[in-house]
Image: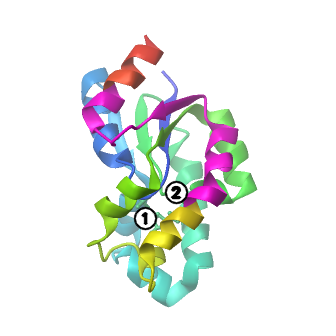
């Protein structure tokens, strides 16, 4: 089977849902951000500090290009992967793209104490999440084969919706 690719905002549950989905479907799981951290040996905030967001995006595009060549893989991507037109084209071609759509309020509740997401290290992270969601939601929809309504963001419920749609 081709790659199942999970997209959506920070805090949407891509990693949790991806792991469970992979387990149930007996597929390998990979996470783009974890792959970048493993390759560089430093954290995402450190990459942003040293190379800026542009440097991180270059590494993200490279990791995406390599990982999506695998079959029988469930891949969780970083929330900003859809910003790049090249990535969007690649996503559409390389797998079944699943958008986990979770309301900004819940995304904020989930990420508010997290120090590992440089884009949320701002004075008003709640507003930042709303802005990012507004800009990105149409881009996620543009490439998605399936939009999963995250409701209150329950991972189990999202996995069940995906399984039903793929059956
Ligand atoms: C980002 C999301 C993060 C990570 C980086 C940038 C974004 O991944 O790639 O901090 O632009 O939304 P998660 O979506 O897994 O948090």
128 and 25: which is toward the camera: 128
**Does the magenta segment cover residue 106?**
no
- Element type where label 2 sits in the image: helix
Residue at 35% in and 78% down: 42
Residue at 49% in and 89% down: 50
Residue at 43% in and 59% down: 10
Can the viewer see residue 27? no
User: Residue at label 2?
Assistant: 63
- Crowding near pointer 2: few (<14 within 10 Å), some, many (20+)? some
4 and 128: which is toward the camera: 128
Residue 96 in picture, x, y percent from top left: 55, 29
Q: Is residue 93 left or right of residue 117?
A: right
Residue at 31% in and 61% down: 109
Q: Quadrant of residue 136 in the image? A: bottom right
| Mark found first going from the N terminus, 1 or 2 | 1
Q: Is residue 116 above or below residue 74?
A: below
Label 1 residue near ligand 1, CB within 8 Å = yes
- Crowding near pointer 1: few (<14 within 10 Å), some, many (20+)? many
**Does the magenta segment cover residue 151?**
yes
Q: Is residue 152 above or below residue 23?
A: below
Q: Is residue 124 left or right of residue 61?
A: left
Do the CB atoms of the residues marked 1 and 2 lie less than 8 Å apart? yes
Residue span colored magenta: 133-159
User: Residue at label 1?
Assistant: 36
C-alpha span from label 1 to label 2: 7 Å
The dot on residue 65 is none
Q: Is residue 113 above or below residue 69?
A: below
* Quadrant location of the C terminus in the rendered image: top left
């Amino acid at each position: 089977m081709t790659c199942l690719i999970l997209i959506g905002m920070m805090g949407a549950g891509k990693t949790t849902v991806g792991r469970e989905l992979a387990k149930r479907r007996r597929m390998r799981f990979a996470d783009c951000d974890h792959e970048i951290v493993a390759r560089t040996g430093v954290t995402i905030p450190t990459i942003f500090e040293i190379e800026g967001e542009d440097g991180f995006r270059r590494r993200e595009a490279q990791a995406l290009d390599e990982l999506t060549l695998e079959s029988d893989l469930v891949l969780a991507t970083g929330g900003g992967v859809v910003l790049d037109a090249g990535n969007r084209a690649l996503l559409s071609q390389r797998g079944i793209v699943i958008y986990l759509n979770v309301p900004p309020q819940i995304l904020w509740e989930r990420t508010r104490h997290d120090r590992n997401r440089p884009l949320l290290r701002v004075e008003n992270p709640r507003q930042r999440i709303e802005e990012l969601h507004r800009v990105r939601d149409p881009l996620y929809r543009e490439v998605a084969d399936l939009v999963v309504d995250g409701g209150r963001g329950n991972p189990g419920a999202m996995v069940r919706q995906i399984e039903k749609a793929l059956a």
